[in-house]
Image: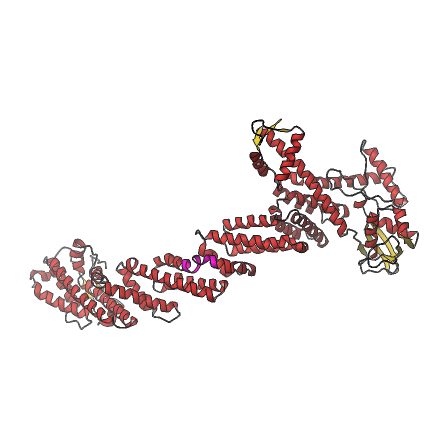
């Protein structure tokens, strides 16, 4: 308590003190260095002490005070100025020791009582002592100032009294260990869901803190007991609960220990070590069992709360690697099931998108977007999506195509960009990006040639995103396809204005001139077209050859499309068909019934193609022709005849009749994959030559390392060996005479 030396000051005692005694004030005088007036008559020390001793005992035993506190204060003041401070301190010390020893004896007697009785006795004795020391210190404050602070290690009589309580009571092994054990017993009962007196525990732990015994004696015993308690609980509950339920219990336990008990009666310094003990016993020690028994189920269910608890429990520890491994194994196992099963091919990409979104959410909400977990997600996704050759890349390209075409129908550019942004991570994981590019090119060609694209701007937006991922070489040919379409539009205008344009043909005729090395290759389909259509073809060919000397055109009939008007009893329909379908349908303008042989002779379409075309026109939803014959089902026979279906009806005016069957899709897939493999051979040989030209000489192992580093597509040791042998046969490489395992660039 500070003293204002310029004034007299009155103080009141603490609330707890006032409850026990009648209110009394002590006035502290501004004495500076002058002795009080009463000091001219030196008092007898023994007489003064007799009064002090009675006062002290009355305070300690909560008895009525026989001496005024103001009088006691002034007597102390006088003694201090009469050089009696040291003797007064010595007498006070002895009186303190006597009282505190009595407290120790009383507590030892209480040790036989139950936990609460003993601990309440300790609490009461401590609080009585603290109240008494506050009162005594206010009376003897001049002793503090004149002697205690200057000649001892204590700052006040309160601190001195606490020190004696520590030495006499709490340094007693029996009393201290009993106190700790009984506190721990009550805490255990609270952990077992009993109601306890938390205020009692708060006072008791405060005693340990005030006496600097908390870290030395209380917390080590408390930590040991906590570890044992939760070790036993972990073993028991993992047998009784499933893992998600168990981890929810763990979360509650962590909250109880690190928040509730800290706020109620433990030191704040205990929070971190206590939390770590709970986590160690409940999570880290049984982590292997937890992961084995419950991790996959929590991931399958998207059960985020226990996953959060699991992550926060091991984050920043060496055990985090176990969780990452479990996360990685889960991703690869569930992902492989999506990719490897051919029956799931129709929904593979949609399933992968949903799977990726789910994993991203878990990383964000449960794993705090931890960089190491995000890296595990990336590596694991790459591993399983590339575990099946070719097919994922092909299906991803097909999914791009379906989304672009469906967006074109809805006319929603914004939706397309969002969809592409979701697809790009899957594309990024692919190793066989050349497979993707080949199939994407094939789908793009159909969209551009058949008018199924949303717009050139949105198509180019997709290409820009792919270019950002893979660089300009990846999209070079794809971008060139747009150039061909734009140039063809200009050519169309020039052709319509040319002298040789067939003005009387009555056909809206448009030609796309495609660079052969840029566009996908398609099987050629020969067909005899109606005379009026042939007139347009021949006229355009003359116009083109005249405009571009040295060039020649090869008509790709399989890529051509037509719009025909069909007149049926139900009304006029607009039939969107390919050129071969159109050639067949136009035959029925001259004859109502045609045999298979007549159609084949009139069109010269190959048998397998013609059967596919006739099947598309006689089966499914759009039966514009009717089949007559002995054959069953949709299969086309050479003996069949075909009739124009005048009774055909449809609620739609515009009808698109597809002709691409599974057999043709399979053939195109083989052609596309074969071309990619040939391109890979050329790229691999070019990479070998480039590396050897730079290094001049390399061992087989070093060459392999360089190739795996530089080549983007998956490599096979057998393929590399074949390419090396091919280059040696063509004198690009040779073996070293000193070491047959070393190659030399020639």
**What predominant SS class does the magenta segment belong to?**
helix
Q: Does residue 368 appear in the picture of this structure?
A: no
Q: Is residue 356 left or right of residue 120?
A: right
The segment highlighted magenta reads: 279-289
Q: Is residue 201 magenta?
A: no
Residue 602 seen in the current view: yes
Q: Is residue 284 above or below residue 674?
A: below
Residue 280 within the magenta-colored segment of the rendering: yes
Q: Residue at x 37, y 59 (%)?
A: 274
Q: How are the colours assigned in the image?
A: secondary structure
- Quadrant position of the N terminus in the picture: bottom left
Q: Which is more toward the observer, 544 or 66?
A: 544
Residue 686 x/y as whole percent = 64, 33
- Left or right: 268 as drawn, with respect to 294: left
Q: Position of residue 668 (x, y in %)?
A: 74, 46
Q: Number of marks in the image?
A: 0
Residue 469 versus residue 547 in the image, above or below: below
Position of 424 compared to 167: left or right?
A: right
Q: Percent position (x, y) of residue 107?
A: 23, 69
Where is residue 424? Give x, y as percent: 62, 48
The answer to whether 337 appears left or right of 146 in the picture is right
The quarter of the picture where the C terminus appears is top right
Quarter of image, res 618: bottom right
The image shows residue 240, relative to residue 534, as above or below, that is: below
Q: Nearer the viewer, residue 410 or 551?
A: 551
């Amino acid at each position: 308590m500070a003293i204002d030396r310029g004034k007299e000051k009155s103080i009141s005692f603490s609330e707890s003190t006032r409850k026990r005694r009648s209110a009394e004030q002590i006035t502290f005088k501004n004495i500076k260095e002058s002795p009080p007036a009463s000091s001219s008559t030196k008092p007898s020390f023994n007489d003064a002490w007799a009064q002090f001793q009675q006062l002290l005992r009355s305070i300690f035993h909560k008895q009525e005070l026989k001496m005024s506190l103001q009088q006691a204060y002034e007597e102390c003041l006088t003694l201090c100025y009469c050089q009696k401070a040291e003797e007064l301190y010595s007498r006070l010390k002895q009186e303190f020791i006597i009282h505190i020893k009595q407290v120790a004896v009383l507590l030892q007697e209480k040790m036989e009582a139950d936990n609460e009785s003993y601990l309440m006795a300790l609490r009461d004795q401590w609080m009585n002592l603290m109240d008494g020391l506050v009162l005594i210190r206010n009376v003897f404050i001049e002793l503090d100032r004149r002697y205690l602070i200057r000649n001892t290690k204590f700052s006040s009589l309160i601190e001195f009294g606490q020190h004696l309580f520590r030495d006499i009571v709490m340094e007693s092994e029996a009393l201290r260990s009993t106190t700790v054990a009984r506190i721990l017993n009550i805490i255990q009962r609270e952990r077992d869901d009993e109601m306890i007196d938390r205020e009692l525990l708060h006072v008791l732990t405060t005693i340990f803190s005030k006496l600097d015994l908390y870290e030395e004696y209380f917390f080590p015993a408390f930590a040991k007991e906590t570890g044992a308690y939760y070790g036993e609980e972990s073993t028991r509950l993992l047998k009784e609960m499933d893992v998600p339920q168990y981890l929810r219990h763990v979360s509650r336990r962590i909250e109880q220990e690190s928040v509730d008990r800290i706020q109620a009666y433990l030191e704040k310094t205990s929070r971190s070590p206590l939390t770590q003990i709970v986590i160690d016993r409940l999570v880290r020690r049984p982590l292997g069992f937890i992961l084995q028994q419950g991790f996959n189920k929590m991931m399958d269910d998207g059960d985020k709360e226990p996953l959060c608890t699991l992550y926060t429990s091991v984050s920043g520890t060496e055990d985090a690697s176990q969780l990452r491994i479990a996360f990685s194994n889960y991703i690869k196992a569930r992902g492989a099931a999506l990719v490897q099963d051919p029956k799931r091919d129709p929904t593979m990409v949609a399933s992968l998108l949903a799977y990726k979104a789910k994993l991203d959410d878990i990383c964000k909400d449960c794993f705090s977007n931890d960089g190491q977990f995000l890296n595990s997600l990336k590596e694991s996704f790459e591993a399983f999506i590339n575990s099946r050759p070719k097919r994922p890349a092909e299906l991803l390209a097909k999914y791009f195509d379906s989304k672009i075409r469906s967006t074109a129908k809805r006319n929603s550019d914004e939706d397309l960009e969002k969809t592409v942004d979701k697809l790009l991570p899957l594309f990024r994981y692919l190793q066989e990006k050349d497979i993707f590019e080949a199939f994407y090119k094939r789908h793009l060609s159909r969209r551009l040639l058949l008018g199924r694209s949303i717009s050139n701007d949105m198509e180019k937006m997709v290409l820009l995103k792919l270019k950002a991922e893979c660089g300009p070489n990846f999209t070079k040919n794809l971008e060139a396809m747009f150039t061909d379409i734009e140039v063809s539009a200009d050519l169309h205008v020039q052709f319509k204005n040319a002298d040789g344009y067939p003005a009387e043909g009555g056909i809206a005729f448009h030609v796309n001139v495609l660079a052969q090395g840029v566009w996908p290759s398609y099987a050629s389909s020969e067909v005899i077209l109606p005379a009026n259509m042939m007139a347009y073809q021949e006229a355009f060919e003359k116009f083109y050859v005249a405009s571009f000397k040295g060039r020649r055109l090869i008509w790709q009939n399989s890529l051509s499309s037509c719009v025909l008007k069909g007149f049926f009893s139900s009304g006029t329909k607009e039939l969107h068909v390919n050129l071969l379908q159109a050639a067949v349908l136009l035959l029925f303008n001259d004859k109502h019934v045609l045999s298979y042989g007549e159609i084949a002779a009139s069109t010269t379409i190959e048998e397998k193609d013609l059967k596919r075309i006739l099947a598309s026109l006689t089966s499914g939803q759009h039966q514009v022709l009717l089949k007559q014959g002995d054959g069953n089902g949709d299969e086309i026979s050479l003996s069949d005849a075909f009739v124009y279906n005048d009774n055909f009806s449809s609620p739609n005016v515009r009808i698109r009749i597809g002709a691409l069957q599974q057999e043709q899709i399979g053939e195109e897939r083989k052609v596309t994959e074969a071309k990619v493999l040939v391109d890979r051979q050329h790229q691999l040989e070019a990479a070998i030559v480039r590396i050897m030209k730079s290094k001049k000489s390399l061992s087989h192992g070093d060459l392999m390392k360089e190739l795996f580093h530089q080549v983007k597509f998956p490599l096979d040791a057998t393929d590399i060996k074949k390419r090396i042998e091919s280059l040696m046969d063509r004198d690009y490489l040779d073996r070293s005479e000193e070491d047959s395992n070393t190659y030399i660039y020639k």
